[in-house]
Image (cartoon, rainbow, N blue to C red):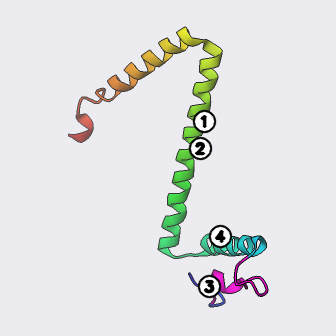
Amino acid sequence: MILANGATPRDEIAPAAGSGRLGPAEHLRALLARLRHLATDASHAAEARRVAGSAFLIRILGALIAYGSQIFLARWMGASEFGIYVYVTVWLLLLGGFSSLGLSIA
């Protein structure tokens, strides 16, 4: 990756004095430089990465919300009622796959 000034994100960071290794502050600066470059890059590949990353984060957020709601419902309903809820939900999901009767691929 090349920044606007012709340098790469690693060129902006100098190793800690005499050690040859980057310290925590340098790692943070390198990460911020890379994120800044990814956010401002206008190429098609960078845009595709941003969109794919956003879609991935939305999927993760949805999974976390679903997981949290399942825990909440299980504690609120109790074992028996939650079991009935899950049983009905699973049957609806299984039967929902057949609801289009193949018309979506016709």
Looking at the image, tell me whether mark 2 or mark 3 is earlier in sequence order.
3
Our reading of the magenta stretch's main secondary structure is loop
Q: How many marks?
A: 4
Query: Residue 30: image x %, image y %?
Result: 69, 75
Residue position for label 1: 65
- Give the residue drawn at x 59%, y 43%: 61
Looking at the image, tell me whether mark 4 or mark 1 is earlier in sequence order.
4
Crowding at dot 4, Cα within 10 Å, few <14 / some 14-19 / many 20+, comes out as few
Label 2 to label 4: alpha-carbon separation? 21 Å
Q: Which mark is residue 35?
A: 4
Query: Residue 89: image x %, image y %?
Result: 45, 20
Up-down relation of residue 19 to residue 36 (above or below): below
Answer whether residue 103 is magenta in the image. no
Residue position for label 2: 61
Viewport quadrant of the C terminus = top left
Q: Residue furthest top?
A: 80
Residue position for label 3: 8
Label 3 to label 4: alpha-carbon separation? 12 Å
- Give the residue drawn at x 64%, y 82%: 10
Q: Are marks 4 and 1 in contact (CB under 8 Å)?
A: no
Query: Residue 60: image x %, image y %?
Result: 55, 45
Q: Are marks 3 and 1 in contact (CB under 8 Å)?
A: no
Q: Which residues are magenta?
A: 7-22
Looking at the image, tell me whether mark 3 or mark 1 is earlier in sequence order.
3
